[in-house]
Amino acid sequence: MARSNRPGWLLDEMRSIGRENLDPAHVRHYDEKEDAEGAAEVALLRSHGLGSDSTVVDLGAGTGQFALAAAEVCRRVVAVDPSPPMRDLLREQARQRGVGLEVVADGFLTYEHQGEPADLIYSRFALHHLPDFWKAMALGRMRQMLRRGGTLRLWDVVYHFPLPEAEARIEQWCASLPAAPGPAAARTPPEEQSGWTRADIEEHVRDEHSTFTWLLEEMFPRAGFQVREAVYSDDGFFARYLLTAV
């Protein structure tokens, strides 16, 4: 969607993208901090029909760990992300690996899919940048992009514990991480440091929009999806979904 055509009430995803995702230093070292298990995800999705004829849209593609792996298998891969430094690194890595994919400067609420409907939409650790109203809107737009019977693979920070436990659980999560980078980091320039800290998690909880499973999962059928599989982490902070477009 051209910026000039966007209504004034539409959320500006560049403002909700997360401070760190616009920081070139963070982006350069993101893959050291976070392993998206791209190859394993492609292998899993191949068992659910992903193949050489598939069209894939990766929304919030970031550095492209999944998109790059999918591009080695699939006919068409579109990697969508609003962050300029993320897209720059993705293009660079695609050139280095010699894989062809389309990199698009858009977000959940503005990407306009062209061509055949997608067989798979993939989104990992990205939907939480949207408040719940906009999550629902984004899910509805994803359904429109998918063919009937297509798959949405959604993996995100989603809270899976009783509401009365929320404060204690969040504090426990924050306390499980170092207050600052370890001793070796004191001798390392900030732009070369890796590893998540308490401050990172505090910022996520405070400034981003992760929600409860019982809120997010209510959106799925309303957007036109059926849950095929839901897997929750033992700590109650992460969920992985396989959804079918109905």
Image: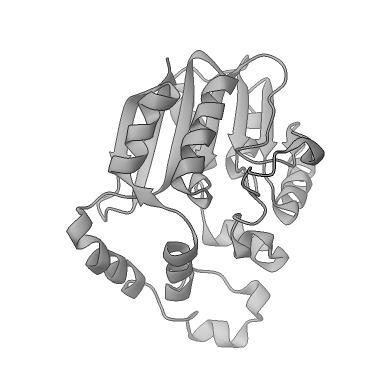
Going by the image, does 209 lie left or right of 117? left
Q: Residue at (49%, 32%) from the top-left corner? A: 139
Q: Which of 114/47 is in front?
A: 114
Q: Which of 139/188 is in front?
A: 139
Going by the image, does 146 lie left or right of 244? right
- Residue 239, by quadrant, is top left
Going by the image, does 7 lie left or right of 133? right
Seen in the picture, residue 178 relative to 72 is either above or below; the reply is below
- Residue 192, by quadrant, is bottom right
Position in image of residue 47 (x %, y %): 43, 21
Position in image of residue 63 (x %, y %): 65, 49
Position in image of residue 218 (x %, y %): 33, 34
Q: Which of 19/185 is in front?
A: 19
Snapshot colouring: one colour
Position in image of residue 88 (x %, y %): 77, 51
Q: Residue at (46%, 32%) from the top-left corner? A: 153
Q: Residue at (56%, 69%) from the top-left corner? A: 194
Seen in the picture, residue 143 relative to 8 is either above or below; the reply is above
The answer, for residue 69, to whether it is visible in the render is no
The answer, for residue 104, to whether it is visible in the render is yes
Seen in the picture, residue 212 relative to 49 is either above or below; the reply is below
Q: Which of 224/120 is in front?
A: 224
Going by the image, does 87 lie left or right of 48? right
